[in-house]
Image (tube, rainbow, N blue to C red):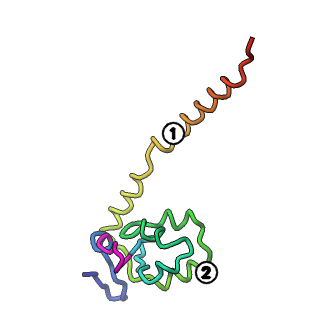
Amino acid sequence: MPEQIPDGVKYYRLSEIEAQNSFKSTWIIIHNKVYDVTKFLEEHPGGEEVLREQAGGNATESFEDVGHSTDAREMASSMVIGEVHPVSRETLVTTVKDESSWWTNLVIPALAAAIVTLMYRIFTVETD
């Protein structure tokens, strides 16, 4: 059950949000706000599968990466049903930080550069 404080904001814990991952109820988190996007699934310009992939979790990075318009942000504001509980925010921040690893940020680009360099040298070697 969501907690409600005197200013009227409803707070949801991550476990409550994660449970809303079905065809009957689809919630996502963007910037610590909880959105019920269930009725918007079929109208979403990117297709409902985009929202379903994020269902029950943090969609902040995906939302910002797409570069939504001002109109889209205003439309989204009408779907806010509450905020992530302050205790759950600590877990959410930790989870987001852990997703970015040295492997994907350093090793993979370096490996790709090495392969491209090797291929360039192989194909530009003069044959005798």
Residue 71 badge: 2
Q: Residue at x 38, y 81 (%)?
A: 82
Q: Residue at x 36, y 88 (%)?
A: 8
- Residue 36 occupies which quadrant of the picture? bottom left
Image quadrant occupied by the N terminus: bottom left
Kind of residue indicated by mark 2: Asp
Q: Identify the secondary structure beneath mark 1.
A: helix
**How many discs mark residues in the rendered view?**
2
Kind of residue indicated by mark 1: Ile
Q: From the viewer's perspective, is 87 left or right of 32?
A: left
Magenta residue span? 18-26
- The percent position of residue 7, horizontal first and vertical second, equals 37, 88
Residue 108 badge: 1
The residue positioned farthest toward the front in the image shown: 128
Image quadrant occupied by the C terminus: top right
Q: From the viewer's perspective, is 11 left or right of 37?
A: left
